[in-house]
Amino acid sequence: MTEYPDRDPDRSTAADGELDTCIEFALNGVKQIVRVDANAILLDVLRNNHGCKGVRASCERGVCGACTVLVDDLPVASCSTFAFSVDGASVETVEGLAAPDGTLSPQQRAFSECGGFQCGFCTSGMLMLTTGLLRQDPQPDRGTIREWISSNTCRCTGYEMILESVERAAELAGETNGESA
Amino acid sequence: MIATPESFTHDVHSDAASGGYTVYSLPTAAPGKRVTGRDLPRADATAKVTGRAVYNTDIVRPGMLHAKVLRSPHAHARLVSIDASAARALDGVTAVLTRNETVGLACYGTMVKDQPVVATDAVRYVGDIVAAVAAVDESTALAALDLIEVEYEILPAVFDVEQALDPSSPTIHPVEPRGGLPPYRNGASASLRSGHNVSYEFRYSTGSPDVWDECDHIFEDTFRFSRMNHMHLEPFVTVAEATDDEIEVWTATQSPFNLRQELGHVFNLPENRIRVHVALLGGAFGAKNGPKADPVAIRLSQLSGGRPVRFCMSTEEGFLTVSQHAAKLTVKAGVKADGTFVARTSTVLLDSGAYAEHSPAVAEKAGYRMPGAYRWQHIDTVCKAVTTNTVPAGAMRGFGATQTTWAGERQVDLIAQRLGMDPYELRLKNLKKLGEEFVPGDAGIDSDLAEGMRLVADAIGYHTRDRGGNRGMGVCVGLKDSGGGNKPAMARVKVTANGDVFLNCALTEMGQGGHSAMSQIVADVLHTSRDRVVYTRIDTDHTPFDQGTNASSGVVVMGQAVRNAAENLRRQVLEWAGEQFALDPATAVLDDWTVRTPAGEVYPLFERIMEYFGHTGFEFSADGYYKVRNDADAPLAARCVFYEIGWAAAEVEVDPETGKVTVLQLAVSGDAGKVINKIGCRGQDEGAAVLGLAQALFEEMRYENGELLNAEALLYRVPLAEDIPERFVSITQEQGHGAGPFGAKGMGEGGMLPIAPAIAQAVADAVGAQLTELPMTPERVFRALSIGGVSSLLPLSHA
Ligand code: FES
Ligand code: FES
């Protein structure tokens, strides 16, 4: 088996003799060059090689969205994405949302203000989904929000408070942009 | 803003288009009591929105191994032979666990201990664990499983409760398991193995059966309740480090001390040789009570020379581990011509699956909760936990009351139709009043049930409804005793010289907001900000004892223990300050880590503490304890500590061509007694309501000839944001009669109870189809329409 110094044995996907590949991508704005197995899953690489434990693993079938990250601004289920496919792309996880000094992003502030979570296991994915949505459509209406949020599962909240969180995030993001403009 | 009754009425009607959330305070809720930061974000907000929150899935130990298990493909089969030699020989495999490695281990389960660590004589359901492997990584463990050869002799299987009761069906547990019963009194009783494939039976009876003679009508109806999976997003996961003498686990459990006790029993170790750590839980809804991934991880660690072993189940494995109870409920009611309820008897058959798991406790409650929210002179209920060759059923939100509320409330609607009465009026006529005993010897009802019904009915415009266009409305109330009456809780509060507070208690945070609520209670008592209170990690070696986080009783039971601890601490600090500053501790107040006297003097504590304790720092520490006292008159040995009540009103539109039900409006409400954290209260009720909505309309584990058809995330349909009704109103009531700190009550289970019956009543109101089975799929609704539904019913008055 190929040994990588930064490899955690947790959730390894390597098996003897499998091909590996060298990829380059930006993780939360920082360039990374890593070797990954050809069949390595983005979720595992992010959690185990890069310490992004905020990316949550639940169904691992591309259904629940707990593992959602942004790849070139679009939300994808990292459990159903091969790591090699992000070669050359920009990948963003929940760890990249807050400013380097810890200031929370509008999405993060909105979710905590409006209580858009309970157990919080879906939250990283919901936040990334919201970030992706607001980049596409900075002022989405309820119907659009509902449609987007329907791609992820939350078993705790009953969704209303998540929908309100997204509306509030759009508002806060609008204010922030307004200030900086 | 707290809505007064007047402003509330205004709010709801002015906001008819969009729904929304309101807190509705009755004058009985003491307004003067401060609860620090009832509008604050949750205490765990920053950790959760930054992704830094640590769940049990995130625990990594040095040198950690990974476990995978082999599950039975058969519903019932004798284990003839298991050959694991090839698996053992595989590179990277450190241990293989089969029945040969379970010698000396005991079985587990609540009251009835019938579940082994891995199958020994036979497998009893599809998914039963036959063998397990620990290896350096998951893929090696999976490869090793393929090398294990098992020879089965297929046995006949039973998948249905009635079939299982038939003496000619196979006996699923030929050997009587170990077990024991809690004390029951005053009309309640129970027995183990009371019949063929019955693991536990509960009976409750009160009043005289003679009253049947006074009844003008006697109605008997049968209802079926479907089975849901919890599908909490964080899977079952355990990291174990164990030898034959000592066990340490990091595990996703709601009940760390119960788990410690159970593991001591299974592995034959003293409890002080077992240490349980719990991080944040990513949801549980009852599923994380009792051992789940733990026994396998522990045994594999023992067999791997004490190296840490992580066993993390997939979502699919979660489906094969525990579920809610499906049920068949037969209810007989005797009523007077004017609609007065007189007598109710019922037989509830809970499908407890292949192992007892938590079923006895659920059956106890299903039997006891059958009277519901109504006044009956005579009650006689029986509930049996029936073993079948299906996934074991255990605790789930609503705990027996979801099943009984479905049948009980549904029958009220059927009675109303037979008597030609309005179902709302029939309920009002028979609802228990505030303060009236639930049953003789138990505590009085601590909410105004009629007021809650009025609120949700008004919120959807029930009384002014237009019955045209295949639209209809329904209103229901679900009630359950809280649990937690007989359960002790302990807490410890510590304060540093600086006034930084540690709260040490074993209430697990699984999303319900327990940590926020507990921290706010401490902050309130100590007059400090919640941000100064840290909720310490749970570790059974150091955290004070608690019986478990369940039955929404945390805020009341643990809340009181926490409040007592904080009050003891405050007293201690004031006494010390009294000596130091020569003031009267009885009149002095603690405020933001200073002491104030009525004369207006202010004494900051930090400098004096440092000086007194030699400038090396100090911690004040105090414990708190709470338990409702035992009561010889209470059927369950102690009086119920609070009642959890859910009210719901729904408006639906039914397409008579297809049977499809669309929920146009849903209003839900719970009584918080007194709100401690608004966001927490709201989330608890709305989340529970949406689970109830899904169970009402589509969510179900589907079995066909014993085969579970949809045991995976791709096929099992959970509610999505799109499934939320167009208008969703939620109202947190503050009625002020709770037994918790400041008058608080627990929330989160009640919201699940009334949803399905409210929707069913709305369907009947819309198109005359009376449903008796869940979920109300288009097919079932259509069938109920075409054959006229339940026999012996008069047509609905408007139909
Ligand atoms: S974990 Fe990736 S979609 Fe569920
Ligand atoms: S907050 Fe628990 S799954 Fe969304």
Image (spheres, grey):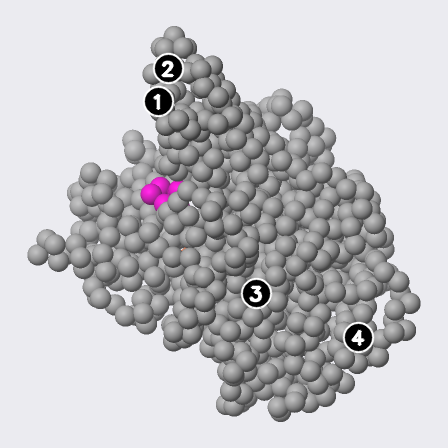
Residue B337, image x, y percentages: 79, 81
Q: Are marks 1 and 2 in contact (CB under 8 Å)?
A: yes
Gap between marks 2 and 4 measured at Cα: 71 Å
- Stretch of the chain drawn in magenta: B42-47
Give the residue pinned by disc 3. B452
Q: Are marks 2 and 3 in contact (CB under 8 Å)?
A: no
Q: Is residue B25 above or below residue B695?
A: above
Q: Is residue A75 above or below residue B190?
A: below
In the rendered image, the residue lying farthest to the left is A181
Nearer to us in this view, A42 or B598: B598
**Mark 1 vs mark 3: in front:** 1
Q: Chain of mark 4?
A: B
What kind of residue is marked 3? Gly
The reply to the same-chain question for discs 1 and 2 is yes
Give the residue pinned by disc 1. B604
**Mark 1 vs mark 4: in front:** 1
| Residue at screen point 91% across, 67% down | B210
Q: Ligand 2 near label 4 (Cβ, under 8 Å)?
A: no
What kind of residue is marked 4? Val
Residue B360, image x, y percentages: 73, 50
Q: Chain of mark 1?
A: B
The reply to the same-chain question for discs 1 and 4 is yes
Gap between marks 1 and 2 measured at Cα: 8 Å
Gap between marks 2 and 3 measured at Cα: 52 Å
Gap between marks 4 and 3 measured at Cα: 24 Å
What kind of residue is marked 1? Pro
